Amino acid sequence: MIEASAPAKVILVGEHAVVYGQPAIAVPIASLRASATAEPGAPGQGLKIVAADLNQTLPLNVDAGLVDHALLKTARLVSETHRRPLPDLTITLRSQIPMASGLGSGAAVSAALARALSAALGEPLELERLNALVYEVEKMHHGTPSGIDNTVVVYDQPIFYVRGQPIERLTIAAPFTLLIGDTGQSALTRIAVGDVRALVEREPERYLPVLSQIGALVREARAAVERGDAATLGERMTQNHALLQTLAVSSPELDRLVHAALDAGVLGAKLSGGGRGGNMIALVVPETVARMRQALERAGAVHVFETTVQ
Ligand code: PMV
């Protein structure tokens, strides 16, 4: 039996601007994962994927042309990369990560599946090839993703990411704690990204500077993370939220959670990911976690996750 997994992620600062070549920082959520378990199947059964949480079983005949399905596409890409037919195997997928809410669920499930399948074929994919493969699958969800989601999920480390440049792993001088508040509303990143593109094309003189300002905040946030300065990191996060509002990717629910967190005394708060729904994050002093969690729940968060970034 082979087991593999990949974490959820949040974007700490820089979403949307990262699509336009600005830097962004993303961190894995170690405790929230997608996993894949591979077991030998009956001779001749081919590859069977059991998506336990989705209540789905996919008897996989990868030649059947069903490649618009992300899981099937993942399996087919592994088989093509290794130039090997799919083995008689049953892979069970499980995920604790809410879907379509900016936590990288699609990338994590795809990474876990590709890891388990390539290991079962006797050739575990190394990180760079796995990352390129998961990026191909991500294109199905996002159109033209920046690549930040698949990279943080595959490398399972905090990253400073600039599109098309080598991955930089971030040094965390002092661990910090995030609360992740889920609005309970799913939102399609593809739509928000398209709407931002329309704004930028319509009024570049107004919106390109907003993207550069986000880039500048990200560089300052990086310096804060690298010297263990949580107060400055929090400020940059809150400023980033205001700029994301200017790009019209927040929502009344996200704003309500962000304001509730700030009123309760967090160090900083912002939406995270594509926006319009999904999740927000708040940087909290560890001793105040219980109180801040309550503030988020009272303001309407349907789930609150906690993670320590280190
Ligand atoms: O998948 P999400 O919702 O976390 O969004 C990814 C971040 C964006 O910058 C909005 C899009 C991208 O491709 O980088």
Image (spheres, rainbow, N blue to C red):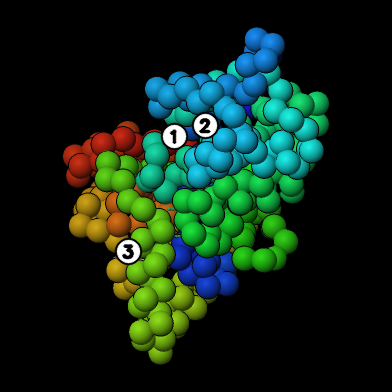
Marks 2 & 1, CB-CB < 8 Å contact? yes
Q: Quadrant of the N terminus?
A: top right
Earlier residue among tags 2 and 1? 2
Question: Ligand 1: does it lie within 8 Å of the C-beta at label 3?
Answer: yes
Point out residue 260 in the picture as x, y percentages from the top left corner: 23, 50
Q: Disc 1 marks which residue?
A: 97
> From the viewer's perspective, is residue 240 above or below residue 159?
below
Some atom of ligand 1 lies within 8 Å of the CB belonging to the residue at label 1? no
Horizontal placement of 207 versus 255: left or right? right
2 or 3: tag closer to the N-terminus: 2
Left/right of residue 310 with respect to residue 241 in the rendered view: right
Q: Position of residue 41 (x, y in %)?
A: 65, 13
Tell me how far mark 1 sits from mark 3, CA to CA: 22 Å
What is the crowding at mark 2: few (fewer than 14 residues within 10 Å), some, or many (at least 20)? many
Up the image or down, 119 lies above or below 305; here it is above
Residue drawn at (40%, 89%) of the image: 205
Q: CA distance from mark 2 to mark 3?
A: 26 Å
164 or 140: which is nearer to us? 140
Q: Determine whether the residue tagged by mark 1 lies in a helix, strand or loop.
A: loop
Residue 283 percent across, percent down from the top left: 41, 49
The quarter of the picture where residue 118 lies is top right
180 or 93: which is nearer to us?
93
Q: What residue is disc 3 on? A: 249
Residue 192 lies left or right of residue 177; in this view the side is: left
Residue that carries the numbered disc 2 in the rendered image = 33
Q: Position of residue 221 (x, y in %)?
A: 53, 63
**Circle 1 Cα neighbour tier, 10 Å, few/some/many (<14 / 14–19 / ≥20):** many
Going 45% across and 82% down the picture, which residue do you hit?
208
